[in-house]
Image (spheres, rainbow, N blue to C red):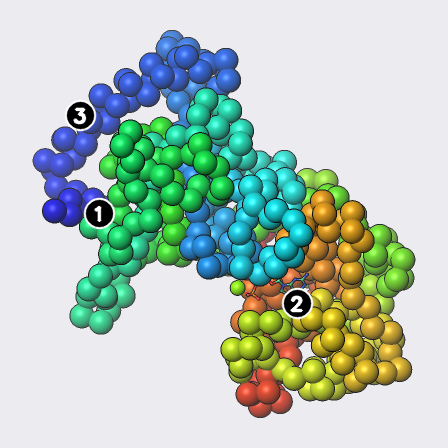
Amino acid sequence: MAASASWTLTWKSVQISCLILFIVTIQVRSETLEDDLLFAPGGQLNMKMGQAKPQRFLLYDVNPGEGFNLRRDVYMRIANLVKKLQERDNWVLVLPPWGRLYHWKSRNMQQVRIPWSTFFDVESLNRHVPVVEFEDYMKITGEGAIDEHVYLQSYKEGWTNGKWEERMHERECNDPPTYQKNGEGKYRGWYWGYSEAYARNFRCLSIQGSAGDLAPFLTKNITARSVMIDRAETVLHDTFGRSDYWEARRSLRFAKPLRDIGDEFRRTYLDSSDSKDKTPILDDWREMKPTAGSAKGGPYIAVHLRRQDFARNNRKEVASLPKAATHIKKKLKELKLKKVFVATDAPASEIDQLKVHLKGYEVYNYIPPRTVHDRFMDGGVAIIDQWICAHARYFIGTGQSTFTFRIFEERQLLGFDTKMTYNRFCGDGEPTDCDPPSVWAVVY
Ligand SMILES: Nc1nc2c(ncn2[C@@H]2O[C@H](COP(=O)(O)OP(=O)(O)O)[C@@H](O)[C@H]2O)c(=O)[nH]1
Ligand SMILES: [Mg+2]
């Protein structure tokens, strides 16, 4: 039977929850005492005084089919959930290792169990909410165990009376879970490629709502020390486009080595540097608040041409190469520029075709040297492309691509005028004056 875990708790269940919470808190406390060396100052006395609360860990994962740039958005939702949870308890966000992404097609390398530090500046993340890599989590807790695996799902019966409303109930799983209990009572399944990892408990939670709505559930219904929220893309942003949204986004900085490679490419081929282009980067993102329009950008146009599955599926947002080239040439003339940087997932043959259509102009694309590709893999190369696009005078993206959306945001954070950023190709299935992308101003 599906137990109700809704936020409308009855008085009786409140009483029971309090009792369970009390018992488990004692248990968690005694566990924590052993870990004091790792978990910062504090002993029983301090904890009684409310100074050092036991550390709790929030892990999460996303539907395996989702791409890198939607995952970055889900990170922001979960980071802000942790921010909210921290008002009550000492929660730490455990970063889900990267790997097995559909778009990472290079076959000559193992693209799995990749730590966040390969792609992102973990110190910057830490300035928003406390985070640890999964391998560090295993070291801290001494094993690869996760106390509670909570699998988010929709409501089997759909919306009530065809109306979407916020709600949350513990339910039987809609689909048979791929995580199965073995003879030792451990739930085994895909934990980012770590065979030693497992969950002690598994449950399904039907939810319609935002990430922050999980906070009461995590503080009242669950008292375990570590909880994994699976299919985290199911929950929405608490506040889209407000200051806490942007704080999470600002903290999600690319790793310095990748930014350095992008900067070197800008200097070498695109006559672009931060001082000339008025795109200075401060070490601490919390101090960066450039006024909109202050960034000039390098003397080149950058475009993101999303092809591959977008083109194969005949999405109406996809422009043919000749149509994209016509758009690029028009803008180059208008802005009196000669150089265009092309970020794309297209095969080399399509890039060559585009170059033919852009004859008379200088067309650049980033081809990683072997050493860079081996170290940073497909994910890192894509970030270098995004970084170069973020610094162009003018940008044109692909409609509905989260890869493009993340470039829009990056440019907003550098201080570009929105007119120089929020542009996209009109697809072959759209009119030539297709709707421009929606503009999101940064809120500081
Ligand atoms: N290097 C590089 N990779 C790209 C480019 N466009 C797409 N990709 C790859 O394809 C993936 C697209 O998936 P995703 O991040 O979900 O973005 P979306 O599908 O466009 O919304 C990216 O994460 C990259 O791995 C590009 O311009 N350059
Ligand atoms: Mg995608």
Dot 1 corresponds to which residue?
Answer: 170
Q: How far is mark 1 from mark 3, CA to CA? A: 20 Å
Q: Residue 427: x, y in percent?
A: 59, 83
Q: Is residue 339 visible?
A: yes
Which residue does the image show at 85% across and 83% down from the upper left?
A: 359
Q: Nearer the viewer, mark 1 or mark 3?
A: 1
Q: Secondary structure at mark 3?
A: helix
Dot 3 corresponds to which residue?
Answer: 19
Give the residue type that dot 2 points to: Asp
Residue 361 falls in image quadrant: bottom right
Q: Nearer the viewer, mark 1 or mark 2?
A: 2
Give the residue type that dot 3 points to: Leu
Residue, far left: 12
Q: How far is mark 3 from mark 2, CA to CA? A: 55 Å
Total numbered labels: 3
Dot 2 corresponds to which residue?
Answer: 345
Q: Is residue 280 visible?
A: no
Circle 3 packing at 10 Å, graded few (<14), some (14-19), many (20+), is few
Decide which of tag 1 and tag 2 comes sooner along the chain: 1
Q: Is mark 1 within 8 Å of ligand 2?
A: no
Circle 1 packing at 10 Å, graded few (<14), some (14-19), many (20+), is many
Q: Secondary structure at mark 1?
A: strand
- Is the residue 148 above or below the residue 289 in the image? above
Q: Residue 58: x, y in percent?
A: 42, 37
- Is the residue 335 above or below the residue 73 in the image? below
Foreground of the two, 144 or 78? 144
